[in-house]
Image: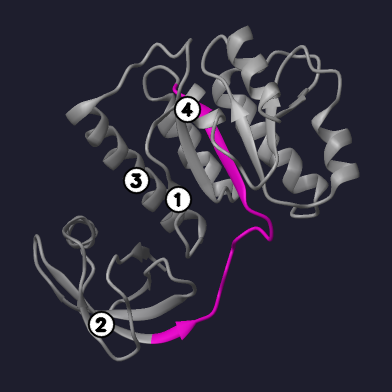
Amino acid sequence: MPRFYCPQPLATGAVVDLPEAVAHHLHVVRMQPGDALTLFDGRGGQYRASLAEIGKKRASALVEEHQALEAELPYALTLAQGLPEGSKMDWIIEKAVELGIAAIQPLAAQRSVVRLSGERLDKRQAHWQGVIVAASEQCGRNRLAQLAPLADFERFIGQPEAQPRILFSPRATQSLAGWARAAGPQAVTLLVGPEGGFSDEEEQAAIGAGALALSLGPRVLRTETAGLAAVAALNALWGQF
């Protein structure tokens, strides 16, 4: 059954206007009034609904039954990702959402080739938010991962953090798997550098601020692989696969 995110609060019995992009999609796939669909508003659970009206740019749905279904991890994982080149960030965000990440923190690191500011940054943030919505619709999550504003690495690492920060480094002597087995399930922030990784200065600053340097194994992983591999590994080690 088609699933769509509806930004306004939903309630059983209400007739709601669907976002224009959703209305366009329903028009393209030729859905008709009375057809069933699933809606969620990000506050938890989802709703069975039926299409009430449809046009090229406008559609409404009758909200029917609330279903208390969740697909969230029992621990909150934050991915602090150094900005990569091109469209790699789209891929990282999409797959991180599918794997259950709770929050995404884009980071401007020393080796980040992409530099964003002003209107260009605003457009990119809005685009990333759309990626989160689309990935959530596809994978069955009823709560949206939080997207934090782009932050400078030094400023981010200097802020206090309630949960452990894990920095992935090829020079680390302790493995993620070993740490995860000993520490057990908990909220953590995963720090992943851009192409070329974090600089030596950034690594030392992170470790000095309390980050734990861990290894993902003997192979050097690309920036678009490292964070996703770490999330998958933690989910497997902590019983979510």
Tell me if 15 is positioned left or right of 199 in this view. left
User: Which residue sits at x=56%, y=9%?
Assistant: 196
Mark 1 to mark 3 CA distance (whole Å):
9 Å
The kind of residue on which mark 2 rests is Gly
Mark 2 to mark 4 CA distance (whole Å):
52 Å
- Rendered position, 148 above or below 215: below
Tell me if 176 is positioned left or right of 21 in this view. right
Asked whether residue 197 appears in the rendered view, the answer is no
The residue that label 2 is drawn on is 34
Badges 2 and 4: C-beta atoms under 8 Å apart? Answer: no
Mark 1 to mark 2 CA distance (whole Å):
33 Å
The residue that label 4 is drawn on is 155
Q: Which tag is nearer the camera, tag 1 or tag 2?
A: 1
User: Which residue sits at x=67%, y=46%?
Assistant: 163
Give the mark nearer the N terminus: 3 vs 2. 2
The kind of residue on which mark 4 rests is Arg
| Tag 1 secondary structure | strand
Badges 4 and 3: C-beta atoms under 8 Å apart? Answer: no
Give the mark nearer the N terminus: 4 vs 1. 1
**Local crowd size for mark 1, using a 10 Å CA cut-off: few (<14), some (14–19), many (≥20):** some
